[in-house]
Image: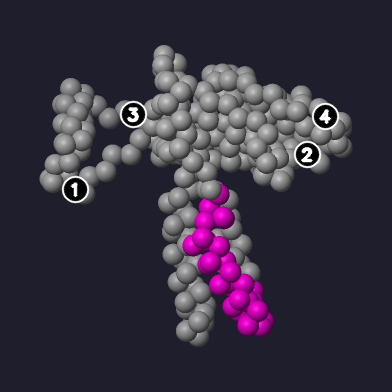
Amino acid sequence: MEIKCPEQGATLLRGVFQQPVRTINPDETIARGAAIQAALKARDAALDEVVLTDVMPYSMGIIAGEVINGRRFADRFSPIIERNTPVPSSRVQTYTTVADNQLQILLDIRQGESPIGSENMPMGVLEINVEPKPAGQVNVDVRLSYDANGMLEVEVKDSKQQLIASKVIQPPGANMTEEDIARALIRLQALKQHPRDQQENIYLVGRAKRLYEDRLGEQRQWLQRWIAQFEMALDTQDGKQISQARDEFRAALDGLDKGFVF
């Protein structure tokens, strides 16, 4: 059984060859990195402003069909957590059935950067039973949560946000106990709230809606555009991008309150 991703445009980029940097001493670089890490663990005051952030080494997602220009392509990789995303991280994507009366969805979780799903490294498989309905009428939210120890949690919820399946995938060679896994899942729990459900974002959108009710004409057009831009930022689930968009959105609303012309 297959699922498909939301329709996306396809863009081809021409690669640019670049010579690697050869002026850095690799031994010295490793030694410096180890010294910085040791100082951070020791909470040395000299490194108060230094922060090291773990990032995803590879993208993680599932194999899915993808519709491009009206044509469906099978065996495509649908990334849910992109490479270089700071960890721990939790991201969610919505998928829908593509066959009438489909009874199951097979989630084939993969790690890698190939656009061809089967060319990426397999992480695990999860089978989900769904209601037999016409194609496109069954939606599921697939959430991947990844921690700094390499543990991956897969959660699937239906359109009513009821959990219908879950799986924990440990990194190769890991020997985590049930207590270790439970603690890791608790740490990841705080990341599972979608940005659109966070209180500060709900408040900001609500403020914009109240201003829309009070305004007319061109100012309503501004507000509609600002709300749409902020919602697009929320859908990225990228904390840095959302924070910047929230600051810009708040500044625009403050300016409208003060009578500025945009």
So how many labels did they put on this image?
Answer: 4
Image quadrant in which you'd find residue 109: top right
- Can residue 255 be seen at all in this image of the molecule? yes
Question: Residue 192's spot in the image, x, y percent?
Answer: 52, 43
In percent of the image, x 55 and y 49: which residue is there? 194
N-term mark: 1 or 3: 3
Q: Nearer the viewer, residue 91 or 12?
A: 91
In percent of the image, x 47 and y 34: which residue is there? 185
34 sits to left or right of 168: left
In whole angstroms, how far apart are the C-alphas of marks 3 and 4?
A: 50 Å
Task: State which quarter of the image contains the N terminus.
Answer: top right
In whole angstroms, how far apart are the C-alphas of marks 1 and 4?
A: 55 Å
Q: Identify residue for label 4.
A: 102
In whole angstroms, how far apart are the C-alphas of marks 4 and 2?
A: 9 Å
What span is in magenta? 194-222
- Can residue 12 be seen at all in this image of the molecule? no
N-term mark: 2 or 1: 1
172 sits to left or right of 143: left
In percent of the image, x 22 and y 45: which residue is there? 50
Q: Identify residue for label 1.
A: 48
Residue extending farthest to the bottom is 259
Residue type of the residue flagged with mark 3: Gln
In percent of the image, x 39 and y 35: which residue is there? 55
Q: Which mark is residue 138?
A: 2
N-term mark: 3 or 2: 3
Question: Residue 255's spot in the image, x, y percent?
Answer: 47, 78
Residues tagged 3 and 4 counted as in contact (Cβ below 8 A): no
Q: Which mark is residue 19?
A: 3
Q: How many neighbours does mark 1 have within 10 angstroms: few (below 14), some (14-19), or many (20 or more)?
A: few
Q: How many neighbours does mark 4 have within 10 angstroms: few (below 14), some (14-19), or many (20 or more)?
A: many
- Disc 4 is placed on an element classified as loop
In whole angstroms, how far apart are the C-alphas of marks 2 and 1?
A: 50 Å
